[in-house]
Image (cartoon, helix red, strand yellow):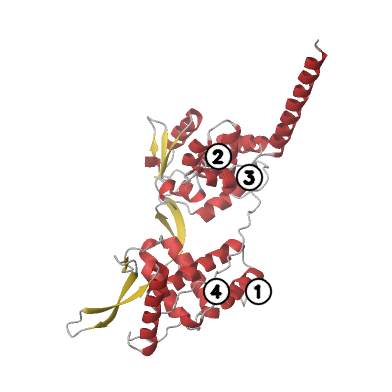
């Protein structure tokens, strides 16, 4: 099926027609030409070949471009779509990894072997200078950028269609640490007894599942006291500005689903109201006028873990702990998914719900007991005349 802006349509005679700009007249108006095919794919490929030949022969007023130029144009073209933190991440990956090895290649000469070999080297050896293997998720992002940049080059007529598959490394599910019931109680008790701005942020995350950036961006004005509701409207992210300096900025949450409203328990609300009486900041987890950045907050979080002798986990583990406790407490997955800000329940189930070893043992015993009771009942029925 044709897409908007492609200028490809199905004619009444059954053929597909693809129109493209072949030249400009004296008034700078576009002069169109058409190519035809029996299928949409055939017509589109013919149009791309014609565009490519035009550029190669100089009619398009462009020489064959390097992949470095394509990447730069692609990033600029898509800048409006990305949050500053995402744009900075993509820009860094392009400049640090892709351009040094593939940037000088002409985009029309790139092939699957070249690209997949590059991705494989990154997965095994990392950067040419550091020689440290990169994570599979990081290399998957590289593959995404390369694929998107090639699609952009094809749409602009800089190269022919690229049908070969770019192999993304399999996503590896990292082991996630959560707090058991005792550690949860120990951390909660410590934070309640030492109500600092950091500890109130920890308590909020333990009871709502907020991400660290969302905790740091949470303002007192985001809390609806009469209705006991918490509004997630912002997060804090890090990006690199034009002077190559890293800055922390408040921006919208990562997805539209991340904008959400979370009910607050009576116990947590009472604690928040108490802290509000002596807080001097507009931010819940800060002691100063502005927000505390996530890196500083994470450092203080680890100090709190050490102080109450709870095993060290990363802050995101609190989000996993919250989700697991909600399931154990009987919360339905749809409700939990909306509280966590997920677009669908499968993300919640596959990523954030973890069954503890004790729960697994209990479930095994439950199954065993079920069949033992069934066997006893069967024997009893057979014994009756």
The numbered mark, 3 or 4, whose residue comes first in the sequence reads 4
Q: Crowdedness of circle 3 by 10 Å Cα count: few (<14), some, many (20+)?
A: some
Q: Quadrant of the C terminus?
A: top right
Q: Nearer the viewer, mark 2 or mark 1?
A: 1
Question: Which mark is nearer the camera, 3 or 1?
Answer: 1
Provide residue 269's location: percent of width, then percent of height.
46, 32
> Is residue 308 depicted above or below 160 in this figure?
above
| Rendering quarter of residue 183 | top right
Q: Position of residue 111 (x, y in %)?
A: 54, 78
| Mark seen at residue 131 | 1
Measure how far apart labels 3 and 1 are at the Cα level: 34 Å
Q: Reading the chain from its start, which is encountered first: label 3 or label 1?
A: 1
Q: Which residue is mark 2?
A: 206
The one of 64 and 186 positioned closer to us in this rendering: 64
Evaluate if marks 2 and 3 touch, with contact meaning CB atoms under 8 Å apart.
no
Res 244 seen here: no
Q: Position of residue 367 (x, y in %)?
A: 72, 30
Mark closer to the observer (4, 2): 4
**Dot placed on the residue nearer the N-terminal end, 4 or 2:** 4
Residue to which mark 4 is pinned: 97
Mark 4 / mark 1, whichever is N-terminal: 4
Give how far apart the Cα atoms at labels 2 and 3 are: 13 Å
Quarter of the picture containing the N terminus is bottom left
Q: Is residue 168 above or below residue 188?
A: below
Q: From this viewpoint, which residue is outermost toward the right?
A: 383
Alpha-carbon neighbours of circle 4 within 10 Å: few (<14), some, or many (≥20)?
A: some
Q: Report how far apart the C-alphas of labels 4 and 1 lie in the structure.
A: 12 Å
The quarter holding residue 137 reads bottom right
């Amino acid at each position: 099926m044709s897409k908007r802006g492609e200028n490809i349509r199905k004619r009444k005679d059954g053929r597909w027609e693809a129109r493209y700009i072949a030249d400009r007249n004296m008034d700078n108006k576009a002069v169109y030409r058409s190519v035809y095919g029996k299928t949409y794919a055939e017509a589109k490929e013919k149009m791309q070949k014609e565009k490519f030949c035009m550029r190669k022969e100089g009619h398009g007023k462009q020489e064959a471009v390097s992949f470095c130029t394509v990447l730069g144009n692609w990033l600029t073209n898509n800048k409006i779509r990305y949050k500053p933190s995402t744009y900075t991440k993509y820009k860094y990956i392009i400049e640090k990894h892709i351009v040094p090895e593939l940037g000088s290649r002409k985009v029309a000469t790139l092939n699957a072997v070249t690209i997949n070999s590059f991705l494989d080297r990154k997965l095994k050896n990392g950067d040419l200078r550091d020689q440290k293997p990169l994570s599979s998720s990081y290399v998957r992002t590289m593959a995404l950028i390369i694929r998107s940049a090639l699609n952009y080059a094809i749409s602009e007529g800089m190269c022919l269609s690229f049908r070969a598959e770019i192999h993304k490394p399999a996503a590896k599910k990292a082991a996630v640490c959560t707090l058991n019931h005792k550690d949860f109680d120990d951390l909660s008790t410590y934070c309640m007894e030492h109500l600092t701005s950091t500890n109130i942020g920890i308590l909020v995350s333990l009871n709502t599942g907020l991400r660290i950036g969302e905790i740091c961006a949470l303002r007192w004005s985001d809390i609806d006291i009469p209705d006991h509701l918490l509004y997630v409207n912002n997060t804090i992210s890090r990006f690199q500005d034009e002077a190559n300096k890293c800055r922390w900025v408040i921006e919208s949450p990562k997805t539209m689903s991340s904008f959400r409203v979370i009910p607050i328990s009576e116990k947590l609300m009472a604690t928040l109201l108490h802290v509000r009486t002596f807080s001097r900041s507009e931010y819940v987890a800060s002691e100063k006028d502005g927000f505390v950045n996530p890196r500083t907050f994470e450092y203080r979080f680890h100090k709190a873990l050490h102080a109450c002798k709870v095993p060290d986990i990363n802050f995101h583990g609190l989000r996993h702990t919250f989700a697991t406790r909600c399931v154990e407490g009987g919360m339905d997955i749809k409700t939990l998914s909306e509280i966590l800000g997920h677009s669908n329940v499968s993300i919640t189930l596959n990523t954030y719900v973890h069954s503890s070893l004790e729960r697994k043992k209990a479930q095994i015993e439950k199954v065993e007991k079920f069949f033992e009771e069934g066997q006893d009942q069967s024997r009893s029925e057979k014994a009756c005349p």
